[in-house]
Structures are given as structure tokens and as C-alpha cells.
């Protein structure tokens, strides 16, 4: 089956936004995109527009998005084809690998076009991309006729959004952001996330091996979204490992793109500031214990734990994260700093200062 305008809206776009079950058909073609973009007003009717704004409100309650239009359609058409690329039985639709390579290149061009139109609205782009990355993939390939014939095959796949936390089969599938995908689909997922800076921060694992898009991150100025990033990184019992992974990704990104432009240096500063705030949040919650289940000697973890010890150098760039804090919080912070001094090796602290902190402080 291949989506028409109404089917694309009711069976794919709206379920992704509302948390239902979305149906993915055969890969969309250029003429399909032309037809869908011409019908952007029908696709984003009152009900679908309400679903988009409601989903936005769950991320940032007071955010106001521009009315959805052709750029949103291009993004969702690209996401539809990404899900096709991610399907384990996709070869029953296109037998030749070259066809999938061509589809990936075309789909990335669609996403680039939509992302360029939303370049001044990074939250808007994140909401669209996140609606697909939060899905859990399941379903099956269905033949187009009672008797299976390869040339008539049509891809049918269901995607159950993460918000269902569903019972049954859906919960056995990882979300698209974390799922192991065929190489071509994994590269496509990475390419999409690199182009969406908020998504790159909130779904770091979906970047694959790609560096953080520091230049784009350096242009992000929404305080509510930065607070959301900090809380997402600080959430859960594995916050130290999460901080270590992000610290490692930041170090790799700095080595690859630090000297490109001032925006990249600002982006590195924002990420360092957010990682410091993770420590502050855990101390504020009185839950900054350095548990025995954590490998505190791992290099990435050591770098993350060394970061608050470098705060005197970072304050000039990032400001004081404890400004205005009550005395009780400052006492807990002092205890946390003393614990970190006991577990962080002096050589590791010096290494982290030289590789990450000093370049940001000296050049920003």
C-alpha cells in the first residue's frame, strides 16, 4: 500500500503526534511528496495541528510554533522513508541495494529542505523528529495480493510511540532512537539528528559515531529547553555514566570541530555548563552519591566527575551555578566537591583541563 493524503494524515502523522499506532506504507516517491506538500493544509487540519501543539506543550508549555506547512510535510515524508529503511523486511520491497541507496539520498534531501525552512525554529524541528525517534517498531510485511509476488510487495509496519509504555509486544522493541538498525538506516538516523541540535542533545545515542553539532548548539538560546536538557541528563540512577558518555562525545567533538567558528566554541561552553548543572541538580536533590555500581575509574566517568573541580576556571565563561543558593545547598555542594577530590585522579583532572576546559575558557 502507498499513502494518499488522507491516509498519510490519519494513519501516519497524527498517530505519531498523539501516541497511537502509525502505519508505514511503501517508500514515498518524489511525485508523492509533491502531492502531499500541495495538500499541507489538509494534512495539518485542525485535529492534527492541535496534536502538534499539544505535543509541543509537553516539552515547553508556553512555546508558540509557527503554523505547520509544506516544510513539516517534507520532514514527515522523510521520517516515513526512514522507517521504511529501518524495517527488517525491507528487501522484499526493493530487491536491489542500489534502490535503497537512491532512496536514502533522496530522503536526506527532503529532510534537508524541511530543516532549512525550520532553521530559525529548532524546537519545532525537534518536536517533529522526536515524534518518530520515540516510536517502538513492530509489525510485518503484507503482500499486496493474496498470493505473494515480490514485485507487488508493499511494506506495512506499525510504530507504537514510547508514551504508551505499552504492555504486550510493543514494550519488547527498543525505541527508534536506540534501536539497532541496518547500516543505511542508522546513517540516515544520524544524519537527521545532526541537523536538529535539540535532538542531538536529548537523544545523544541516536548520533551514532557523529560528533555533537557544536556550531548549531552554540546558537541555542532557549533557557526552558536548556533546563529540560539538564534534567534529562541528570535523571535516573545512571546519571554518572550518562554524564561520562556526553563528556566523551564533547571531547571527540572538540577535537573535530572546535576551531571552525565562534558558534562551535559557544556550543562547547553550553554543553559544559549543562554538565555542571547536572551535578548541581543531583546535589540539590540530595542524591549525588557516587555508587559502588559505577566504574569510577573509567576515563569518561573521571572526566565528568572532574568537571566541578574545574569550576573556578569555568565561572568566568559560564557564571556561578550556585549564585543565590541557600546555605544548606552550598554545604551539600562542598561535601560533593570533597568526595570528588577523593575519587578523581590528579592526572585525569589536569588532562581534562588541558583538553576541554582551557580551550573553552581561553578562546570564548
Image: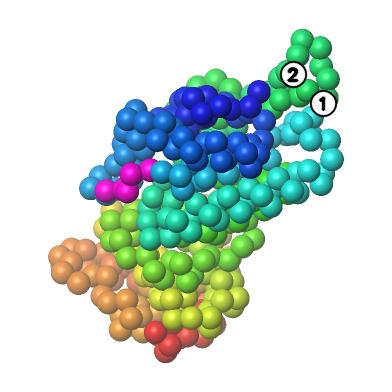
Identify the residue at image location x=66%, y=23%: 1
Of the two numbered discs 1 and 2 on the same chain, state the one appearing first in sequence: 2
Q: Is residue 67 shown in magenta?
A: yes
Q: Is residue 108 above or below residue 146?
A: below
Identify the residue at image location x=29%, y=42%: 57
Q: Is residue 248 shown in magenta?
A: no
**From mark 1 to mark 2, how far is it between C-alphas?**
10 Å
Identify the residue at image location x=39%, y=79%: 310
Question: Residue 344's spot in the image, x, y percent?
Answer: 48, 73
* Span highlighted in magenta in the image: 64-68
Q: Does residue 38 appear anywhere in the picture?
A: yes
Q: Residues within 10 Å of mark 1 (few under 14, many from 20)?
A: few
Question: Residue 125's spot in the image, x, y percent?
Answer: 43, 51
Question: Residue 135's spot in the image, x, y percent?
Answer: 52, 35
In the displayed structure image, the side of residue 168 where residue 181 appears, left or right = right
Say whether marks 1 and 2 touch (CB < 8 Å): no
The quadrant in which residue 297 appears is bottom right
| Residue at numbered disc 2 | 143
In the displayed structure image, the side of residue 228 where residue 296 appears, left or right = right
Magenta stretch, overall SS = loop
Amino acid at each position: 500500500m502507498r499513502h494518499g493524503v488522507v491516509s498519510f494524515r490519519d494513519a501516519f502523522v497524527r498517530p505519531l503526534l498523539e501516541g497511537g499506532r502509525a502505519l508505514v506504507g511503501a517508500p514515498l516517491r518524489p511525485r508523492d511528496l509533491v502531492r502531499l506538500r500541495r495538500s499541507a493544509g489538509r494534512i495539518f487540519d485542525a485535529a492534527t495541528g492541535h496534536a502538534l501543539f499539544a505535543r509541543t506543550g509537553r516539552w515547553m508549555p508556553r512555546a508558540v510554533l509557527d503554523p505547520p506547512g509544506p516544510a513539516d510535510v517534507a520532514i514527515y515524508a522523510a521520517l516515513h522513508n526512514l522507517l521504511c529503511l529501518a524495517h527488517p523486511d525491507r528487501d522484499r520491497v526493493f530487491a536491489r541495494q542500489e534502490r535503497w541507496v537512491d532512496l536514502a539520498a533522496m530522503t536526506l534531501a527532503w529532510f534537508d529542505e524541511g530543516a532549512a525552512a525550520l532553521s530559525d525554529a529548532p524546537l519545532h524541528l525537534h518536536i517533529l523528529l522526536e515524534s518518530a525517534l520515540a516510536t517502538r517498531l513492530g509489525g510485518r510485511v503484507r503482500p499486496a495480493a493474496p498470493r505473494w509476488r515480490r514485485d507487488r510487495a508493499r511494506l506495512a509496519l506499525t510504530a507504537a510511540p514510547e508514551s504508551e509504555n505499552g504492555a504486550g509486544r510493543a514494550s519488547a522493541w527498543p525505541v527508534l532512537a536506540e534501536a539497532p538498525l541496518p547500516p543505511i538506516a542508522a546513517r540516515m538516523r544520524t544524519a537527521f539528528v545532526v541537523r536538529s541540535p535539540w535532538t542531538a542533545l536529548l537523544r545523544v545515542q541516536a548520533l551514532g559515531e557523529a560528533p555533537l553539532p557544536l556550531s548549531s548548539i552554540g546558537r541555542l538560546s532557549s533557557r526552558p529547553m536548556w533546563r529540560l536538557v539538564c534534567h534529562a541528563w541528570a535523571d535516573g540512577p545512571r546519571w554518572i555514566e550518562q554524564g561520562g558518555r556526553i563528556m566523551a562525545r564533547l571531547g571527540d567533538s572538540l577535537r573535530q570541530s572546535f576551531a571552525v567558528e565562534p558558534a562551535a566554541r559557544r556550543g562547547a561552553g553550553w554543553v559544559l555548563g549543562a554538565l555542571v548543572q547536572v551535578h548541581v541538580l543531583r546535589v540539590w536533590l540530595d542524591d549525588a552519591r557516587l555508587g559502588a555500581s559505577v566504574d569510577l575509574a573509567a576515563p569518561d566517568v573521571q572526566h565528568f566527575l572532574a568537571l566541578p573541580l574545574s569550576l573556578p576556571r569555568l565561572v568566568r565563561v559560564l557564571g556561578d551555578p550556585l549564585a543565590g543558593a541557600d546555605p544548606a545547598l552550598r554545604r551539600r555542594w562542598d561535601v560533593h566537591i570533597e568526595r570528588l577530590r577523593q575519587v578523581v585522579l590528579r592526572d585525569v583532572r589536569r588532562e581534562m583541563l588541558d583538553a576541554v576546559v582551557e580551550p573553552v575558557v581561553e578562546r570564548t
